[in-house]
Image (cartoon, helix red, strand yellow):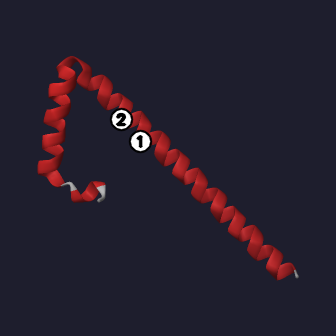
C-alpha cells in the first residue's frame, strides 16, 4: 500500500485522529517533525541513488578498460 492510494478522505481521517491525539497546540510541532523526517528521508534516498549511480559508472568504466 502506498501513500498515494490513501486518498483525500483517508488523509482527512488521519488528520482528525492526529488532532484528537495531540491537540491543536501540538499539531504544528508534529507537522514540523514529520516534515523534517520526510526531508531527511528524501536526502538519504537521493544520496543512496547517487552512490549507486557512481558505483555503476565505475564498474562500467572498469569493463571498458579491460
Q: CA distance from mark 1 to mark 2?
A: 6 Å
Can you tell which quarter of the image residue 22 is in? top left
Label of residue 38 in the image: 1
Label of residue 63 in the image: none
Query: What is the x, y in percent for residue 17?
Result: 16, 34
Name above or below for residue 58 compared with residue 19.
below
In this picture, residue 14 sits left or right of residue 60:
left
Number of numbered markers: 2
Label of residue 34 in the image: 2
Residue at image position (27%, 24%) is: 28
Can you tell which quarter of the image residue 55 is in? bottom right
Would you say the residues marked 1 and 2 are in contact, meaning their CB atoms lie under 8 Å apart? yes
Residue at image position (47%, 44%) is: 41
Image quadrant containing the C terminus: bottom right
In this picture, residue 39 sits left or right of residue 59:
left
Query: What is the x, y in percent for residue 49?
Result: 58, 59
In this picture, residue 10 sits left or right of residue 64:
left
Amino acid at each position: 500500500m502506498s501513500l498515494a492510494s490513501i486518498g483525500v478522505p483517508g488523509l482527512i481521517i488521519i488528520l482528525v485522529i492526529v488532532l484528537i491525539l495531540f491537540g491543536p497546540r501540538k499539531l504544528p510541532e508534529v507537522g514540523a517533525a514529520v516534515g523534517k523526517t520526510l526531508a531527511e528521508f528524501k536526502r538519504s534516498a537521493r544520496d543512496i541513488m547517487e552512490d549507486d549511480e557512481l558505483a555503476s559508472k565505475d564498474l562500467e568504466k572498469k569493463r571498458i578498460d579491460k
